[in-house]
Image (cartoon, grey):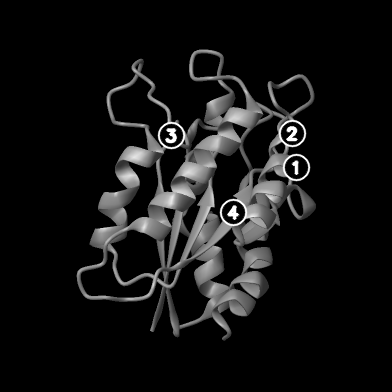
Amino acid sequence: MRTVLCYGDSLTWGYDASGPRRHALEDRWPVALQRELGDGVHVVAEGLNGRTTAFDDNLVGADRNGARFLPTLLSSHAPLDLVIIMLGSNDMKSWIHGDPFVARQGMRRLIAIVRGHDDPLGHPEPKVLIVAPPVASPGKKGAGELAGYYEQLADEVGCGFFDASGVCEVCQIDGIHMDAENSRRLGEALAPVVRVMLKL
């Protein structure tokens, strides 16, 4: 059995802007990915609204700093074969950082955490797949810039890259989140990439 950790924010959690509410379980992209991959792979969804790559948000209760929480998840879900990271949208908030290049640096930190995590059982380090979130509506801070930065980073550090904007789009309600159809579409589109990375 292979295990894949999906680490993200509200797009992974399944936030539905039309409610506001949460998408039905079957409409969340990690669940769609699980359906496509079948029984030989266990997909773990770890999404949290407002999560950043590596920055604090002191306006909320739960810890949103992705770099601080990731080591715990790597241990609790070990052994992992692949970590899919789709973060960065919340880094664009003006009170977080508001800079796509700095979000890239935050993503670099997350990759380093995955690769440097101490597995007491000696399992090989999991592979990493960076997913650039779907492009936010025009006018949103950093819209369209994250994908380019993330693709360059993936080339530099030797991990996988996928641009969600190639297969899905954000809803018109808030210009940030996906509707149920686009969320499912993302999970389905990621399945072939995961199969290649895990040599399934």
* Amino acid, disc 1: Gly
Q: Are marks 2 and 1 in contact (CB under 8 Å)?
A: yes
Pointer 3: what residue?
A: 54
Q: Label 2 vs label 4: CA separation?
A: 14 Å
In percent of the image, x 29 and y 68: which residue is there? 78
Q: Quadrant of residue 136?
A: top right
Q: Label 4 vs label 3: CA separation?
A: 15 Å
Q: Earlier in the sequence, mark 3 or mark 1?
A: 3
- For label 4, the SS is strand
- Front residue of 93/113: it is 113
In the orientation shown, which residue stands out farthest toward the left? Answer: 120
Q: Label 3 vs label 1: CA separation?
A: 19 Å
Instruction: Using residue 94 as the reference point, say whether residue 81 is left or right of it.
Output: left
In percent of the image, x 51 and y 52: which residue is there? 85
**Residue 148 - label:** 1
Vertical arrangement, residue 197 with respect to residue 44, above or below: below
Instruction: Using residue 199 as the reference point, say whether residue 162 is left or right of it.
Output: right
Q: Earlier in the sequence, mark 2 or mark 4?
A: 4
Pointer 4: what residue?
A: 130
In percent of the image, x 64 and y 30: which residue is there? 101
- For label 3, the SS is loop
Vertical arrangement, residue 48 with respect to residue 77, above or below: above
* Amino acid, disc 4: Ile
Which quadrant is home to the C terminus? bottom right
